[in-house]
Amino acid sequence: MPRIHITDLEAAINHWRHQKPSPDGVTLAPELRALATVYARMVFHHEDEAGESHFTPDALAAWLAWYDTTADTPCIAICSTSQGDTLCKGCGRSFEEVQRWLEMTPFEKRSTWRRITLEASAWRFGRYADRALENKQLP
């Protein structure tokens, strides 16, 4: 079962802090309160990931509203899985992840995003940009 990493939860919390700042420095918006409860449980139990079952309906709604503001796909329109590669050189997703992307849940997508970000081997994470710069420097 895919799980959300605490960094995604922190990003959602920061999103809501920016969207609905506290009017008095103490009061939290409902979205923040809901997400803070999930965050507190994770910290208390020394967990760095939470499954969908850890989220109350309000927390899940707040997280999904943040999720809707993020980039949906890591695709950079250079797909090597169509040429037989196990992992796409452009975005880092597996052939199955590329094929199933539209039917994947937000939790599955964020789990995939986390994996490819940690691996940082796909061109989307700088290699393509680095190669473009190298080509400009050639005589």
Image (cartoon, helix red, strand yellow):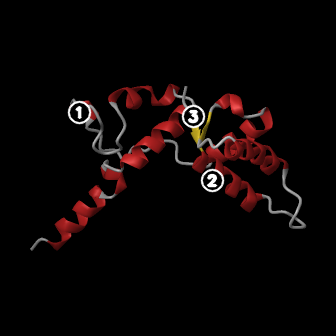
Q: Amino acid at mark 2?
A: Ala
Helix, strand or loop at label 1? It is loop
Asked if residue 101 is positioned above or below residue 42 in the image, the reply reads above
Helix, strand or loop at label 3? It is loop
Q: Which one is nearer the viewer's eye here, 117 or 43?
A: 43
Q: CA–CA distance between discs 1 and 2?
A: 32 Å
Residue at the spot of label 1? 85
Mark 2 or mark 3: which comes first in sequence? 3
29 to the left or right of 7:
right
Q: Is residue 107 visible?
A: yes
Q: Position of residue 38 (x, y in %)?
A: 73, 42
Q: Amino acid at mark 3?
A: Arg
Determine crowd level at label 2: few under 14, some 14-19, many 20+ residues with C-alpha closer than 10 A.
Answer: some
Asked if residue 84 is positioned above or below residue 68 in the image, the reply reads above
All told, the count of numbered labels is: 3
Q: Position of residue 110 (x, y in %)?
A: 53, 40
Residue at the spot of label 2? 11
Quadrant containing the C terminus in the rendered view:
bottom left
Mark 1 or mark 2: which comes first in sequence? 2
Q: CA–CA distance between discs 3 and 1?
A: 26 Å
Residue 126: quadrant of the picture: bottom left
Asked if residue 19 is positioned above or below residue 64 in the image, the reply reads below
Mark 3 or mark 1: which comes first in sequence? 3
Residue in view at x 17 percent, y 73 percent: 137
Q: Amino acid at mark 1?
A: Asp
Residue at the spot of label 3? 3
Asked if the residue at tag 2 contacts the one at tag 1, i.e. Cβ–Cβ closer than 8 Å, the answer is no
Quadrant containing the N terminus in the rendered view:
top right
Determine crowd level at label 3: few under 14, some 14-19, many 20+ residues with C-alpha closer than 10 A.
Answer: some
User: Nearer the viewer's eye, disc 3 or disc 1?
Assistant: 3
Residue in view at x 36 percent, y 50 percent: 120
